[in-house]
Amino acid sequence: MLRPDRFLGALRPRRFSLIQKLTILTGTVVVLFMTLFAWVNINNLQKLLVNNTIRDLDNLASTIIRMTRHQMLVDNRIIVYQMINEVANRPGIERIRMINRNGIIVHSTATHEVGQPLDTKAAQCNLCHKPGQALIRPPLLERSRFFTLPNGKQVMGLARSVQNEQSCSTAACHAHAESTKVLGVVDIIVSLDVLKADLASYRNRIILLTVLLIILLGASLTFFTLHLVNRPVNELLRHTARLAQGQLDCEMTPTSNDELGELMRAFQLMTSNLRQARNDLEEWGRTLEEKVKERSEQLQRMQMQLVHTEKLASLGELVAGIAHEINNPLSGILIFSSLAAKDKRLDPALKGDLETISSEAQRCAGIVKGLLEFARDYQPKMTTCDINQVVIDSLRLVECQAVFQNVAILRQLANNLPQIMADQNQLKQVFINIFINAGQAMQDQKRGELQIITTQSAELKGGVLIKISDSGCGVPTEQLGKLFDPFFTTKGTGGTGLGLSVSYGIIKAHGGTIKAESDVGMGMTFIINLPCCAEGNTPPKDTTPTLLT
């Protein structure tokens, strides 16, 4: 099986990973900013060192002027020059020169310069002798200069003017006019090697520190990127690869509570939903054959029922026609048998035979009447009625019959039941039929029990339920499905098999349901559910033929 990492490598072209991109971008930004920071620091340090050196040279020049002031007043030039030479022996000082107001070098630690005039147009003189003005007092930084000696050494020079004081103009050695402002210049030249060495040392330290900071920042960013970004993303990629391979049972634990953690939780939820969907599909695949078979059986039963319905509809028409045809000769038989039985000329020995003919003819008339009721598409006449009152009225019509002599009738009629819309005569016909069947089922018992219960229906919202139970012999379970079929009877030759079928049609016409429960030796129970309708409303016409079971 292809590993997830190899699968991802085969799925996409070669490219930089997320951690590589982040490392390169953050490293570039850090290097640029740290380089800029180091460059600014080195430039600032260079300016600081130069400014400090200029101030030191200015202080040194001022010190030389103050040190030699007394000796200059007494015109003791030898001492003055010795003092200058002693100061010039300090490390880093290349030379010290004294230049008079006429630009003549009167003393220099470089003896070959003594007596030479300076070119006022030279770079070192332009600091004071600017075009249009001479011997002005420039700012400190403008009195410094950088240049290279003939031997290639880079140096910095600073000139400090010697001002004409009152003591100088009144000194005994020589006199200067009071109008003269500048008597000369002390020029100090120092080497830049020390400055360069300090600057190079600091620059090296800055570069080293910058490199270390870049490495530390890069390592820190890489570590946190790996921990906070790269690890969750790689986990998501591995999880996605397993999903692509169909491994929907894989689990993924969120590593954080941030957006990536929410994304991982969303992926985990998606995986669970996909796994559940796959399990459902597999379950459907496993049970599809059974469902198809079950549905086929239902369709077959429906088809058989439709065929049966058509047959019953045709049978109903045939029965109605036959019943009408039989009624006419039966009426004649009944009339003429009754007349013959009353005729005085009749031999008394034949009177019993005529009574038998009349009785059997009446029996045939009853059968024909049942056939007509069964086949007739009779629409109920709906009125508002109380189901308890209908049950009580039905009991009054049958409880005095001989089949109920040894039967105890128990009534449990609930109060405050809703009114129903029904044809009371048809409902009485249903109840009487069930009561008589129950009485006949218990007539061989010493003590039978008929229980009648009314309550609110749980099957039909707002409807009523009527439960009629007897303690008779019951019927086998396999015969329960045929109880409401036309012409099916458990009474042998004593029944027509039309009573329950007619009752079923009546209940269906009222929009209700009727079913039977029984076990052999445990009695029979009929459960009827009837809907509750508002007054003035009639249940929809049941277009199903009354022959349907």
Image (cartoon, rainbow, N blue to C red):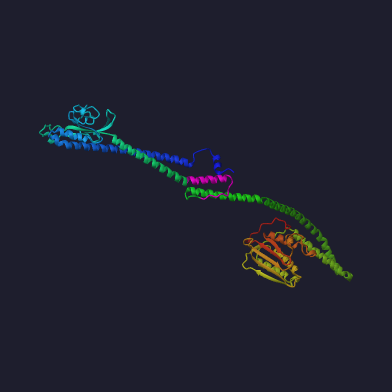
In magenta stretch: residue 515: no
Q: In the rendered image, is residue 476 in sight?
A: yes
**Residue 246 in the figure: left or right of residue 503:** left
**Residue sitting at x 70%, y 61%:** 506
Which one is nearer the viewer's eye here, 355 or 156?
Answer: 156
Q: In the rendered image, is residue 483 in sight?
A: no
Q: Position of residue 478 (x, y in %)?
A: 74, 60
**Residue sitting at x 56%, y 50%:** 272
**Displayed quadrant of residue 511:** bottom right
Q: Position of residue 426 (x, y in %)?
A: 71, 63
Given the current orientation, which residue lies at the most extreme left position? 172
In magenta stretch: residue 239: yes
The kind of secondary structure the magenta stretch mainly shows is helix
Q: Position of residue 377 (x, y in %)?
A: 73, 58
Q: Quadrant of the C terminus?
A: bottom right
Q: Quadrant of the N terminus?
A: top right
| Magenta-drawn segment | 228-253
**Residue 263 in the figure: left or right of residue 212:** right
Q: Position of residue 240 (x, y in %)?
A: 55, 45
Which one is nearer the viewer's eye here, 313 or 379?
Answer: 313
Which one is nearer the viewer's eye here, 519 or 502?
Answer: 519
**Displayed quadrant of residue 531:** bottom right
Q: How many marks?
A: 0
**Residue 526 in the figure: left or right of residue 338:** left
Which one is nearer the viewer's eye here, 110 or 538?
Answer: 110
**Displayed quadrant of residue 517:** bottom right
**Residue 280 in the figure: left or right of residue 333:** left
Q: Is residue 366 above or below residue 14?
A: below
Q: Is residue 543 above or below residue 15?
A: below
